[in-house]
Image: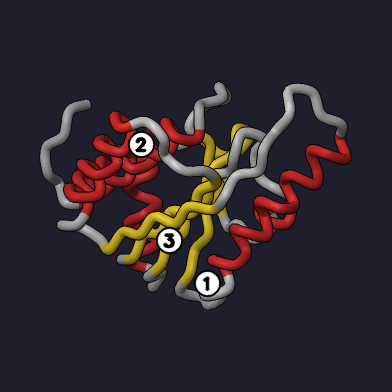
Amino acid sequence: MNIEIICVGKIKEKFYRDAIDEYSKRLSRYCRLSITEVNDEKTPESLSDTERDLILSKEAQGIEKHLIKYNSAQDYIITLEINGKSYSSEEMASAIDNLSVSGISNIIFIIGGSLGLDKRITEKAKLHLSFSRMTFPHQLMRVILLEQIYRSFRIIKHEPYHK
């Protein structure tokens, strides 16, 4: 199984990078993981709808450059969205396991920037996933996503992990 995480923005804080490195190392036992960072656009404090749409569109262009290689039946795109579907850890593990059994070899998770994701990116997704109705910094969301992917593989393999 190949897991790719495409995310808007770079990780600035060392503690986030350390956590990402740790989960990446742990996941290497279960899958091939790649993380692709797309440049985020400067977002002014107050912005018009037009400015917001322009920023989302520019970030979408960066994401689309990496999605070009994913257009087969073996690819499964998941966007992280506040209004997406919520899963328990067990349900997420089951979903990943079911994808693997059904012939999906590439799962692509997409994390947007501070404004979210452009509609043309969300329309490419086969699943819109929500970890919470709360908003998290995209840097922290990357760590949370990696931890849940790791937890999913531990559950799939019937290996212990705290509940």
Whether 1 is drawn above or below 52: the answer is: below
What secondary structure is marked by label 2? helix
Q: Which residue is mark 1?
A: 70
Foreground mark, 3 or 2? 2
Q: Identify the residue shown where x is 58% and y is 43%.
A: 112
Residue labelled with disc 2: 143
Q: Tell me the kind of residue under disc 2.
A: Val
Quadrant of image for the N terminus = bottom left
Res 107 label? 3
Distance CA(mark 1)–CA(mark 2): 23 Å
Q: Is 111 on the left-hand or right-hand side of 26?
A: right
How far apart in space, not on screen, are marks 1 and 3 (Cα)?
9 Å
Please say if 102 is above or below 78. Answer: below
Q: Earlier in the sequence, mark 3 or mark 2?
A: 3
Location of residue 65 by image quarter: bottom right
Q: As shown in the figure, which amino acid type bears the numbered disc 1?
A: Tyr
Residue 148 located left or right of residue 110: left
Above or below for 46 versus 1: above
| Circle 1 Cα neighbour tier, 10 Å, few/some/many (<14 / 14–19 / ≥20) | some
Label 3 SS? strand
Q: Quadrant of the image for the C terminus?
A: top left
Q: Earlier in the sequence, mark 1 or mark 2?
A: 1
